[in-house]
Amino acid sequence: MSGQFRVPATYMRGGTSKGVFFRLEDLPESCRVPGAARDRLFQRVIGSPDAYGKHIDGMGGATSSTSKCVIISPSDRPGHDVDYLYGQVSIDTDFVDWSGNCGNLSTAAGAFAIHAGYVDAGSDGVRTVRIWQANIGKTIIAQVPVSGGAVQETGDFELDGVTFPAAEIVLEFLDPADEGEGDDGGAMFPTGNLIDALDVPEDLVAGGKLTVTMINAGIPTIFVNAADLGYAGTELQEAINGDPAALKRFEALRAIGALKMGLIDSLEGAAKRQHTPKIAFVSPPRDYVSSSGKAVAAADVDLLVRALSMGKLHHAMMGTAAVAIGAAAAIPGTVVNLAAGGGERQSVRFGHPSGTLRVGAEAVQQDGGWTITKAIMSRSARRLMEGAVFVPDDTI
């Protein structure tokens, strides 16, 4: 006996993230339901918790973009093909966060539904895969290209933050708002305001007030103005991630915002809700050079956005945060909308550390409030490896 057991799995890139994908029926029986056994399995697959922060003994890549596991299963929900459940595995702490979705891996979820045999590829063209996002209870529609009875994975669609081109997959996030928890967490704007003056300690922000937009759309997100934090909005990863004091300040601000949004009951609760909410800073357009060395001109974007995920600045942009950006940009008067020049809009192109991304959102005002009917963006996905992962027998 090797002392290990094997679990069929597929390693996939989706958008600017990658993760280990499982069919529900392939998991050990004790891991087919939520609980400690499932968490331990996913942690061991990824290689967490890792005090070294490297994930040498697992499939993870020691970043928030690569410490992910996904379970796909046939859906019993009418009008849906598959259920998609996502776990964000903490790198260095004993924790799996199930509180939100990964928009990038939503792309791979649509493709994997066909790879796994849950959705028939059918004739050449584009296959519509209707996904139930089980973490947040929302519908995602993936338009997956197919050719020769299989997913078409190669193509000429380029995505900033991904080195090689691939086939384009269009995602529609239906009614992406209202995914919060708590008494007020279910509202798209939990406080009822497009803009709030958040009370914060003066050692975090001079004056003790921070102008923010807090929105539940795609994923709960706290948007702040870059200038209010002393940033230009053109920063790349090292400028933030190499500054421990800055990361500590962002986490403190995120916890204060999460409490105001009704997502946690105390500031200490943020430590057990690392995946949500996100915190991002925005600024009007300006020229900068992306992490790949590509020049991004101010004229090519509507605004700049930098977002943090799991306590670090993201190398590009989380898909769900892109939905939040599109939703907030579509609603006149938010911090995001004002940074983009104000007014009504149905799409926005923003600059992020790796380049640019366009996202569309349809906003409707009803009874004095705003509703986002859907958000749309293009990503790509590709299988990197398929077979089985091996996990020590004593894991579960």
Image: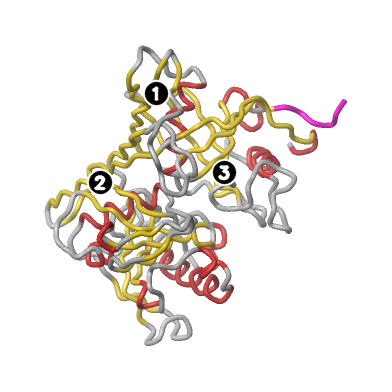
In front of the other: label 2 or label 3?
2
Q: Are marks 1 and 2 in contact (CB under 8 Å)?
A: no
For the point 50% across and 62% down, the residue is 313
Q: Are marks 2 and 3 in contact (CB under 8 Å)?
A: no
Disc 1 marks a residue whose amino acid type is: Asp
CB atoms of marks 3 and 1 within 8 Å: no
- Where is mark 2, residue-wise? 360
Q: Which of marks 1 and 2 is in front?
A: 2
Identify the amino acid type marked 3. Lys
For residue 4: magenta?
yes
Which residue is identified by label 3?
68
Q: Distance between the residues labelled 1 and 2?
A: 24 Å
Residue 35 x, y percent position in the rendering:
61, 40
Kindly report which numbered mark, 3 or 1, lies closer to the viewer in this rendering.
3
| Above or below: residue 281 compared with residue 81 | below
Q: Name the residue under label 1.
A: 81
| Residue furthest out toward the left | 367
- For numbered disc 1, what is the local secondary structure? loop
Mark 3 or mark 1: name the one nearer the start of the chain: 3
* Mark 2 surroundings within 10 Å by alpha-carbon count, few (fewer than 14), some (14 through 19), many (20 or more): many
Residue at image coords 25%, 61%:
299
- State which quadrant residue 119 falls in: top left
Amino acid type at image mark 2: Gly
Which quarter of the figure is the N terminus placed in?
top right
Per the rendered image, the range of residues in magenta is: 1-6
Q: Is 340 on the left or on the right of 275, as rendered?
A: left
> Can you say whether 35 is above or below 109 in the image?
below
Residue drawn at x 22%, y 43% is 373
